[in-house]
Amino acid sequence: MLHRLSESATLAMSRKSRELSEQGVHVVNLSLGEPDFETPDFIKAAAKEGIDQNYTHYMPVNGYADFRKSIAEKFRRDNGIAYSPEQIVVSTGAKQSIVNVILATVNPGDEVILPAPYWVSYIEMVKMAGATPVVIETSIEDDYKFTPEQLRAHINERTRMLIYSSPCNPSGTVLSEEEIRALADVVAEHPRLLVISDEIYEHINYAGRNFSMAAVDKVYDQVVTVNGVAKGWAMTGWRIGYLGAPLWIAKACTKLQGQFTSGASSIAQRAAKAAVEADPSATHHMRDTFLKRRDLMAALLGEIPGIECNVPEGAFYLFPRVSAYFGKSHGDMEIRNADDLAEYLLGEGHVATVSGAAFGSPDCLRLSYAAAQPDLEEAAKRMKAALAKLA
């Protein structure tokens, strides 16, 4: 089974960037999806308090009861979803939450629908379960959104699951309430179909309040809502994700996790409890900074011939189409695809990006603008110079 899995493209590019940096090369790294803010002080204080209160022993596999109660209240407050604490499972990051659901509900021979572009790990997790990924193609002209008609056309008797993220990694696309309700109408037509709604970028939404499919009553029992504290609260290193799900799925994920990792870090749970209990407005300064960076980077990319870029409404990524450079070359380097272009930009321009091929969109690159303004300006300058050499 392991030979079927690919290395994470984002982690691979970050590794290559780090190796160059260790050789003394100044690389502007736009490859990793990590906020460049520090965890808020009140969250750090909650972690320190947890240590002082001796939260240093084994914890319940699915998370501390009071933390799960806080998460349930967060879902009610922010998303309009009624989950009981028993329907919540805390894991070591949203990544584990997602793979728990897939392994607990998807069997070999099942099909899982992935609208492209999709997060790199979705397709590898589906392979791990022995299932078949079924990709829905989208386009930059439509802001990388998939439609109810496309979803309906890809469902058959083998379809078990749909996985999507909104705001989306890598495109930054945000599905509106109207669009999600229309997709829910299709999901309701197929009672066997389960949905994973990945909402880890919930608080980095420039369009307003995020809408969750599980808030649509008629599909409540078909939807698993995955979230966490990494992106919106600048807590990537704390490794806390969580899910809200129909009770049977929550129990299945707890059983599975009990054999893999048991509970997530006790101290990190105390910190994350403070985050989910806080008013989301505490994250707005980070969101507003990301918005300014999005506008800056979109404008800078718009000045580079051959790069086509939409303006997404969430997350901290741009996902430009770069196929105009395919078939060009510089020296011994021929650009056949986005993989080659990402390698070229790293080697020639010393800018780390990620090929869209890993996200199911081989004509694109993913650029993270979770970096300081001077770094973004320098990255765009280097990219423009490097790309101008291609002929």
Image: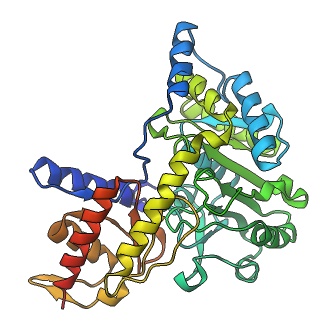
Residue 187 appears at what percent x and percent y?
Answer: 81, 68
Residue 64 against residue 142 in the figure, above or below: above
- Count the labels in the image: 0
Foreground residue among 104 and 35: 35
Q: Report the residue at 10% width, 82% height from top.
A: 332
Q: Quadrant of the C terminus?
A: bottom left
Q: Is residue 122 left or right of residue 79?
A: left
Q: Is residue 262 above or below residue 297?
A: above
Image coords of residue 11 (percent x, y): 35, 53
For the point 21% across and 73% down, the residue is: 344
Left or right of residue 330: residue 82: right
Name the residue: 49% across, 37% down.
Answer: 235
- Residue extending farthest to the right is 218
Tell me: residue 211, above or below residue 140.
above
Res. 255 in view? no
| Residue 186 in picture, x, y percent from top left | 82, 73
Res. 55 in view: yes
